[in-house]
């Protein structure tokens, strides 16, 4: 159990609530029993909306100390610009924003362990296996996001011999082209998605179009992995006992394309 007298911990996601899943709400439910403070959630593109939830926090006197976890797998505009802006507009400029999921300490190792365990369970040789990281992506993408490329390179060092590939749900490189992107006979799909919404349940299998004889395994969306809450709680606990500026201050800075150009890769954001 995390220490007593903790701030409010809020899960924020892009949005699927009421339309194919409730990933932020589901994550909040898991974390709630392990955090000695209020746990809430909100969405940036669906309901319950983040601005409405922030107003509710203030009405319920739960906003004086606030830690926000972005359930995102990229460092783009929503996390680096819009989320801080929402907090400032709500008068919550003292809130702490944790790193998005892809930058959480221990996230890389968690994914690496899951890949190695999955390959061993299937009896797949590393040198005969391709692993596809599948983020949401953007329709305008012509290449993988820098943070996904960086993550893939780091993951390759943990999963020796495995071919690490990237295939977006939206934009290029597209998961629909997995047969030409990968070169190995065994394929392990890692959905870097918040939960089991439309993208995970419908779009992803359709894009793969598995045929009889294909050696393919699709893992659960990473946002639903049971190990993820422990990473979030560990990072949130670092900021739970003090309101002073954390030593690993993280200030996202984005160019016009929305790509992260910060000098830090991990750490919490103090607005």
Image (cartoon, helix red, strand yellow):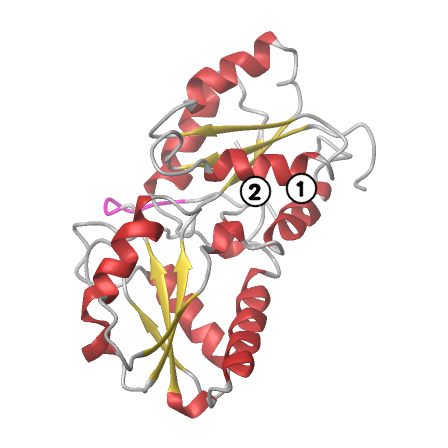
Q: Which residues are magenta?
A: 253-257
Queried whether the magenta region covers residue 188, the answer comes back as: no
Quarter residue 240 falls in: top right
Q: Which mark is residue 195?
A: none
Which residue is pictured at 25% across the width and 53% down the height? 203
Crowd rating for badge 1 (residues with CA inside 10 Å; few <14, some 14–19, many 20+) = many
For label 1, the residue is 236
Q: How many marks?
A: 2
For label 2, the residue is 98
Which residue is pictured at 47% across the width and 86% down the height? 124
- Asked if residue 163 lies left or right of residue 240, the reply is left
Q: Is residue 189 above or below residue 81?
A: below
The quarter in which the N terminus is drawn is top right
Q: Position of residue 220 (x, y in %)?
A: 46, 58
- Asked if residue 228 lies left or right of residue 19, the reply is right
Which residue is pictured at 23% across the width and 59% down the height? 206
* Predominant secondary structure, magenta span: loop
Q: Is residue 76 above or below residue 209?
A: above
- Asked if residue 248 lies left or right of residue 84, the reply is right
Q: Position of residue 258 (x, y in %)?
A: 29, 45
The answer to whether any part of residue 97 appears in the image is no
Do callouts 1 and 2 mark residues in contact (Cβ within 8 Å)? yes
Q: Position of residue 29 (x, y in %)?
A: 61, 35
Which residue is pictured at 65% across the width and 17% down the height? 62
Quarter residue 114 falls in: bottom right
Q: Earlier in the sequence, mark 1 or mark 2?
A: 2
Q: Is residue 211 above or below residue 36?
A: below
């Amino acid at each position: 159990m995390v220490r007593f007298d903790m701030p409010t911990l809020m899960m924020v996601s892009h949005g699927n609530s009421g339309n194919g899943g409730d990933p932020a709400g589901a994550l909040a439910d898991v974390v709630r029993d392990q955090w000695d403070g209020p746990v809430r959630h909100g969405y940036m593109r669906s309901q319950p909306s983040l601005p409405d939830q922030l107003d509710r926090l203030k009405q319920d006197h739960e906003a004086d100390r606030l830690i926000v976890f972005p359930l995102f797998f990229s460092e783009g505009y929503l996390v680096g610009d819009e989320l801080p802006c929402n907090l400032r507009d709500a008068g919550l400029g003292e809130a702490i924003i944790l790193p998005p999921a892809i930058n959480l300490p221990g996230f890389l190792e968690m994914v690496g362990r899951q890949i190695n365990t999955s390959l061993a369970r299937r009896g797949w040789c590393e040198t005969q296996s391709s692993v596809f990281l599948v983020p949401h992506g953007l329709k305008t993408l012509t290449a993988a996001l820098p943070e996904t490329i960086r993550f893939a390179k780091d993951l390759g060092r943990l999963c020796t011999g495995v071919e690490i590939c990237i295939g977006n749900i939206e934009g290029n490189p597209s998961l629909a082209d997995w047969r030409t992107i990968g070169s190995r006979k065994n394929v392990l799909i890692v959905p870097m998605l918040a939960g089991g919404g439309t993208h995970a349940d419908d779009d992803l299998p359709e894009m793969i179009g598995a045929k009889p004889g294909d050696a393919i395994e699709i893992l659960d969306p990473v946002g639903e992995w049971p190990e993820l809450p422990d990473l979030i709680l560990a990072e949130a606990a670092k900021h739970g006992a003090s309101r002073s500026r954390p030593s690993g201050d993280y200030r996202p800075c984005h160019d016009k394309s929305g790509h992260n150009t910060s000098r830090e890769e991990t750490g919490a954001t103090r607005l």
